[in-house]
Structures are given as C-alpha cells and as structure tokens.
C-alpha cells in the first residue's frame, strides 16, 4: 500500500518491451500501421507514435504535417533505413563495420541522436572503420586480402536502458550557446545604435 493513501502500486517491469515487441509484430504483418516511409522506391510501413517517439524529424513530419506518406532523400540507403527503423521497435541496432558512416549519416538526417552517439563512439574507438569506408567505399575486404585489418564485421548496439545522448547533446548545447552569444551581441549592437 502506498504510504498515506488507500491505494496499491504494482509494476510490470517488462510491459514496455512487450508492447514494443507487439508493435513490431504488427509492423511486420502490416497491421495497424498508419504511415509509410518511401526510401528509393522501397516502402516501409510503421506506426506514427513509434516514429515520433524515436525521432524529432519524424515527430515533425507526423505532427506538423500530419503526413501519412514520408519520402526520404534518395541518398538514404534502404537497408540502412530498414535497420534503423527496426531499432526504433527493438532498441537494438546491428551495423556492418564498413557501413557505420552510412548509419551516422542517416541517423543525423533523422535526428536520431542516440544512434548518432553510438556511431560516434564506435568511430572514435575504431577510427580505422572510417578510413576503411573512405578508402574502399562499401566494398567488403576478404580476410585473405593483404590490406585486411581484422575489423569486427558488425557492431550491435543494444538498449542498456539509457535514454540520454551525451555527445549529440554536447553538440546541440554548443550550437545553443553559439546562438545565445550571437543574440547577445546583436542586442548589444542594437542598443549601441540607438544611443
């Protein structure tokens, strides 16, 4: 019983993950989906609520524009988008090492800062992934190749229950500070002009 009340509090610890699992099953079966995302002609069905909760970009698309069909730029890789979409329902993302930069680019566009943070962490911890992407495009190297560097072929980023995105937040805070400084300088100049 809750202290000072006549009510009982019970918790269902796995309820939120169960709900997402069921929503993902519905998405996979095309049930109760209320939005379509088009990427290079590929159509992905999803739930507006899940997209809006996962991405400020999608939140704007579904709340401000009330879009039922969202067409993403052709530079977006359909397979990368599909995996990022799946991560919105599962809290896990498997990224092939040579494609980390593609995931970073897609996540940046979609404003999915949690994915941006994880991609950045992977790249900071393993800068050869970035060099490999820049030097070889998305070509996979064979372990028998003389230039093979033994990189892990994919990274799985799981949901540790954390919802804070420190690196992306630092970037956004820096941008906000820069804007504040510009606003202060602008108001000082305006005041000076009238003196």
Image (tube, helix red, strand yellow):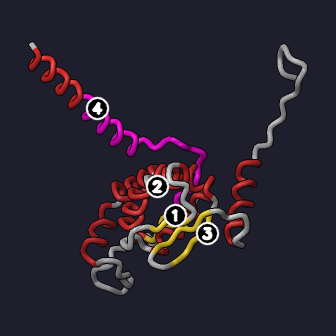
The structure residue drawn at horizontal position 28% and vertical position 78%, both measured from the top left corner, is 136
Lower sequence index among marks 4 and 1: 1
Point out which mark residue 177 bears: 4
The structure residue drawn at horizontal position 52% and vertical position 50%, both measured from the top left corner, is 59
Q: Name the residue under label 1.
A: 84
x and y percent of residue 192 in the render?
A: 10, 17
> How far apart are the two marked residues, 2 and 1, measured between alpha carbons?
8 Å
Regarding residue 74, the answer to whether it shows in the image is yes
Label 2 packing within 10 angstroms: few (<14), some (14-19), many (20+): many
Q: Give the range drawn in magenta.
A: 156-180
Please say whether residue 139 is one of the residues in the magenta stretch.
no
x and y percent of residue 124 in the render?
A: 33, 54
> How far apart are the two marked residues, 4 and 3, measured between alpha carbons?
38 Å
Image marks 2 and 1: residues in contact by CB distance under 8 Å: yes
> How far apart are the two marked residues, 2 and 4, measured between alpha carbons?
23 Å
Label 4 packing within 10 angstroms: few (<14), some (14-19), many (20+): few
Image marks 2 and 3: residues in contact by CB distance under 8 Å: no
Q: Mark 1: which secondary structure? A: helix
Label 3 packing within 10 angstroms: few (<14), some (14-19), many (20+): many
> How far apart are the two marked residues, 4 and 1, measured between alpha carbons?
30 Å
Q: Mark 2 points at which residue?
A: 115
Q: Mark 3 points at which residue?
A: 45
Image marks 4 and 1: residues in contact by CB distance under 8 Å: no
Looking at the rendered image, the quarter that the C terminus falls into is: top left
Instruction: Establish if 167 lies above or below 47.
Output: above
Lower sequence index among marks 2 and 4: 2
| Quadrant hosting residue 50 | bottom right
């Amino acid at each position: 019983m809750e202290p000072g009340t006549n009510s009982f509090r019970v918790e269902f610890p796995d309820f939120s993950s169960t709900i997402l699992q069921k929503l993902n099953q519905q998405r996979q079966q095309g049930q109760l989906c209320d939005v379509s995302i088009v990427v290079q002609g590929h159509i992905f069905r999803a739930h507006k609520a899940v997209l809006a909760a996962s991405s400020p970009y999608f939140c704007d698309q579904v709340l401000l524009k009330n879009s039922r069909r969202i067409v993403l730029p052709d530079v977006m890789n359909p397979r990368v988008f599909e995996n990022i979409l799946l991560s919105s329902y599962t809290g896990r993302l498997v990224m092939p090492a040579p494609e980390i930069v593609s995931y970073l680019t897609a996540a940046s566009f979609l404003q999915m800062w949690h994915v941006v943070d994880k991609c950045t962490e992977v790249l900071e911890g393993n800068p050869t992934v970035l060099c490999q992407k820049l030097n070889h495009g998305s070509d996979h190297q064979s372990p028998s190749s003389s230039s093979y560097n033994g990189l892990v072929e994919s990274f799985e980023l799981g949901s540790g229950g954390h919802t804070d995105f420190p690196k992306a937040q630092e970037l956004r805070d820096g941008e906000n500070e820069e804007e504040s400084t510009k606003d202060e300088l602008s108001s000082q100049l305006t005041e000076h002009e009238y003196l």
